[in-house]
Amino acid sequence: MRLAFLGTPDFALTTLRRLVAAGHEIACVYSQPPAPRGRGQTLKPSPVHAFALDQGLIVRTPASMRDPGEIFAFEALDLEAAVVVAFGQILPGEVLDAPVFGAFNLHGSLLPRWRGAAPIQRAIMAGDAVTGVQVMRMTPGLDEGPILASETLPISSLDTAGSIFERMADIGAELMARTLAAVEHGEAIETPQPADGVTYARKIRPKEARIDWSRPGLEIDRKIRGLSPFPGAWFLLPTDRGPVRVKALLSAFEDADGAPGQVLDDRLLVATGQGAVRLLRVQREGRGPQDAEAFLRGAAVAAGTRLD
């Protein structure tokens, strides 16, 4: 089919690659504008943008899809369908209605649970045992459209947002490819979302990322894994040169007691308001991620240390 693809991060790129391989005609790729990245804060295109350029595809990076000129340009593409994966903007009704068959979104939850911006992160932070990926027909309401295809994914006690994203990207790409084939051949079945069980996955705010060790250990463990690798839950580690920010990227809950924030052994077991959290992977400010064992070889953290 003749498609427009709207997406920005690596998660979306997996689907774009699959649609290109399937032989669809990608009339235009839309992505968020280039953003400052790296230490030099050089403007760089998103993963989807960079791939599209490499493939010789037309790319547009509008600041807003609500701009009348952008709506006109989109309508002029004469599309059969639009595919949206983690694009990063709310699309107006004129854009959703422009393609012959409509616009289809790949969403990372089992709707109507976790509508909104951060469904994978919120599912882990809430302690959900199962999540999923779905293809949804887009409507003006926030993630309210009918479901065309769905796959479930278990969430283990050591899963992070990053590990779920990786699995979901591959499964979702195949799901979207199969769904578009069904739409093209008139075989797609659309199921309205149930009215019960609606929850919203609000955007992750920077102030949420700091760890409050007085909270229950299970809650802290879920926060660490839900915010890993980005933005990363963090704490302050005391050093001879003053406190240093450290991100916690992987953890496990353990049944142990102590004053909240107190390190209970020499292997980064930290007491919380209820139980304790074993830090398994961390990242000191200005350095790369490390397993706890490697981190401790360069910065011993003795039992009794208080983390803030």
Image (cartoon, rainbow, N blue to C red):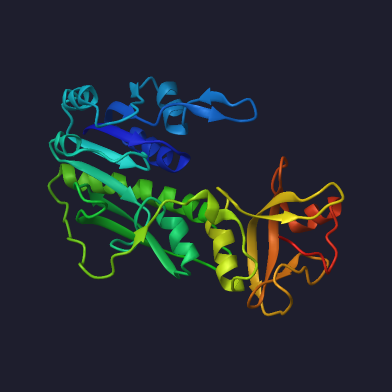
Residue 281 coordinates in the image, percent (x, y): 69, 56
Say which quarter of the image contains residue 151: bottom left
Would residue 161 be seen by someone viewing this image from the given angle?
yes
In the picture provided, is 244 more to the left or to the right than 7?
right
Q: Quadrant location of the C terminus?
A: bottom right
In the picture provided, is 285 more to the left or to the right than 122?
right
Does 37 sit above or below residue 157?
above
Would residue 24 be seen by someone viewing this image from the given angle?
no
Does 308 sit above or below residue 136?
below
Q: Quadrant location of the N terminus?
A: top left
Q: Nearer the viewer, residue 154 or 268?
A: 268
In the picture provided, is 304 more to the left or to the right than 40?
right
Residue 239 coordinates in the image, percent (x, y): 83, 52
Residue 207 coordinates in the image, percent (x, y): 54, 52
Say which quarter of the image contains residue 89: top left
Q: Residue at x 42, y 51 (%)?
A: 203
Does 151 sit above or below residue 8?
below
Say which quarter of the image contains residue 134: bottom left
Q: Residue at x 47, y 32 (%)?
A: 47
Q: Nearer the viewer, residue 303 or 242?
A: 242
Does 8 sit above or below residue 129?
above
Residue 129 coordinates in the image, percent (x, y): 45, 70
Q: Nearer the viewer, residue 285 or 180?
A: 285
